[in-house]
Amino acid sequence: GIQFFLGKKFAMLRSKIAKETDARVSLISEAVFGVRVVKMSGWEYQMEERISKIRDVEMKKIISTSRLKALNEAMFFSSNIAV
C-alpha cells in the first residue's frame, strides 16, 4: 500500500528533478559556449542569478525526495521489526 504509493511518488519526483537538472546544465552549457559574449556584455550576474534560481528549485525537489526516501526506509525497517 504505502510502499507502492511512495514508489510512484519517487518516480514522479525523479522525473521532475531530471527536468530541473537538464535546464540548469543546458543554461550552464549556453553560458560556457557564449562566455565571451556574456563577459563583453556584462551579463555575468544575470547569468549567475538564472543558474542559481534553477539550482534552488532543483535542490528543493532533491531535498523533498530525500525526506520521502528517509520516511519510506524508516517505515520499511520499523515494519520488519514489528513483524
Image: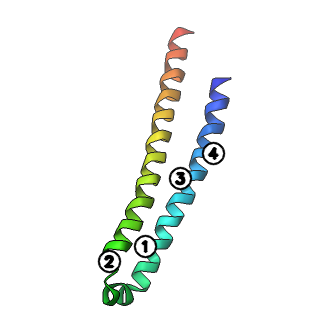
Q: Residues within 10 Å of mark 1 (few under 14, many from 20)?
A: some
Q: Which mark is residue 73?
A: none
Q: Which mark is residue 28?
A: 1
Q: Earlier in the sequence, mark 1 or mark 3?
A: 3
Distance in Å between CA atoms under marks 4 and 1: 25 Å
Question: In this orientation, which residue lies closer to the viewer: 50 or 75?
Answer: 50
Question: In this orientation, which residue lies closer to the viewer: 26 or 78?
Answer: 26
Residue appearing at x 43%, y 73% in the figure: 28
Distance in Å between CA atoms under marks 1 and 2: 12 Å
Amino acid type, mark 3:
Ile
Q: Which residue is mark 4?
A: 12
Q: Which residue is mark 2?
A: 44
Q: Which residue is mark 3?
A: 17
Residue appearing at x 47%, y 72% in the figure: 27
Distance in Å between CA atoms under marks 2 and 4: 34 Å
Q: Nearer the viewer, mark 1 or mark 2?
A: 2
As helix, strand or loop, the secondary structure at mark 3 comes to helix
As helix, strand or loop, the secondary structure at mark 1 comes to helix
